[in-house]
Amino acid sequence: MKNEKTQQEQYEYMTTAPVGPLILSMAVPSMVTTLVTSIYNLADTFFVGKIGTSATAAVGVVFSVMMVLTALGFWVGTGGSTLISALLGAKENKQADTIFSTAFFLSFAFGIIVAIVGLLGGAPLMRLLGATDTIVPYALDYSRFLLPAAPFAASSLALGQCLRAEGKSKESMTGQVIGGVLNMILDPVFIFGLQMGVRGAAIATALSQVIAWALMIRYYIQKTTQVRLSFRDISKNPADYVRLFSVGSPSLCRHGCNMITNVLLNTVSGRWGDAAIAAMSICGRLMYLTNAVSIGMNQGSQPVIGYAHGMKNYPRVKEGFSYSVKVSTVSMCAFGAAGFLLAPYLIGIFRDDPEVIRVGATALRLICLALPFGNYMQSANTLFQIVKKPLSSSVLIFSRQLIFYIPALLILPNLFGLIGMQMSGPVADVLAFVLAVPMVYRYLRKLQE
């Protein structure tokens, strides 16, 4: 009876609390989680950067494999969390249990598959992902010790998403923050103290991912959550899988396309040597750190908008989206200005190589100029995903990555050389923004009808 009362209180809080403070209460833990995750990813880049330019580039190459893992984890994690928040809003708690259990065990299975394929792929796979002959040995060392933790990393994404779906952003944050801090502590211990090089960086990250997973899953084991985790609750209804996969498909598209473009970026950057690959890898990690506010606001708005959509409170849906966009856009403008001014210094922190700094600083400045445009596109994508318009969300993702970014990477370097490669991503962000604005406008107008 006590548990039922707690669930009712949580329902009333998620559906009646003022939108702005509620989104912030959900978003801040997500921002902290993203920041810490970014920092410990940067920690690998920072400490590996002390080994050499090729080692730094190797981390960027293997990152493509981890992007596949992220795509699969977010596919079922975001699909599950979106459905869960709507189901809780409609008070269909038993079905929420089924969706969560299905999403969790699917993500774990996907992680096993990625680990097997990645480990068996060896050197040919690393070359396919853009590694040069000097990068391959480092990439193999890094991947062999990182991939065994893939099932835990993938299912951690589902755990974090689903905890946030029921309003438990702080609980989601705790495990990932502790894992991130541990990674930053273990990196120098394994890399330099035990003299394990890139292997040490991989082991430190793998251990941290497993510990973060354990800390999050304990909430379900202790049954302090609204939804329950049970192997027996895995759905046997094909319709549940169709809903899970279709609602989560925009995340699969986004992260899957990110992986494809990352591989292509590594390949194109390779024309200018290992230094260019290392520079673009550092830029990518720094941008994930910069996007922490945008990602946090999107994740914070997800349960709020999801509950409102589930109970058909459309004015609250519109209010939640508008608030999230305003806060994140202002933040992106501020971060973009700081990144533009400090670009050479920021790149130099991770690799004291004049060529890496030269290539990376220009690329980072161009990326910073386009931050507000990319932020709006991401917010629009999240909105369409939450309100169960996966086609609109997927159109935005495919357009940004496949229609705008990939052609830019293939055409602009041939026309303008190195600067063409560096400006490809920002050009794609601006074009995606131009596409997103009328799509969002039409949807919000329909809510008023």
Image (tube, grey):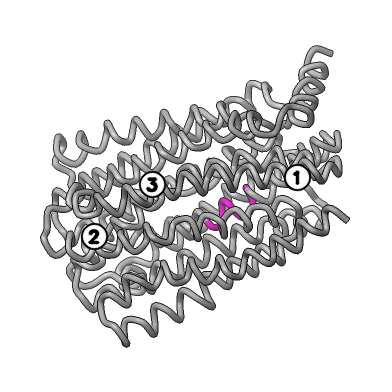
Quadrant of the image occupied by residue 55 = bottom left
Q: Vertically, is 88 above or below 52?
A: above
Q: Residue flagged by tag 1: what amino acid is it?
A: Val
What span is in magenta?
71-77
Pointer 2 residue: 361
Mark 3 or mark 1: whose residue is earlier in sequence? 1
Where is residue 327 drawn, in percent x and y?
55, 42
**Magenta stretch containing residue 72, yes or no?**
yes
Where is residue 23 drawn, in percent x and y?
63, 34
Mark 1 or mark 2: whose residue is earlier in sequence? 1
User: Residue 65 bears which disc, if any?
Assistant: none
Q: Residue flagged by tag 2: what amino acid is it?
A: Ala
Q: Secondary structure at mark 1?
A: helix
State whether the magenta stretch is mostly helix, strand or loop: helix
Whole-number angstrom distance, CA of label 3 to CA of label 1: 27 Å
Where is residue 111 drawn, in percent x and y?
52, 52
Whole-number angstrom distance, CA of label 1 to CA of label 2: 39 Å
Whole-number angstrom distance, CA of label 2 to CA of label 3: 15 Å
Q: What is the tally of numbered marks visible in this picture?
A: 3
| 10 Å crowding of disc 2: few (<14), some (14-19), many (20+) | many
User: Residue 335 bears which disc, if any?
Assistant: 3
Mark 2 or mark 3: whose residue is earlier in sequence? 3
288 relative position to 365: left or right: right
Given the current orientation, which residue lies at the most extreme right position? 449
Q: Secondary structure at mark 3?
A: helix
Pointer 1 residue: 317
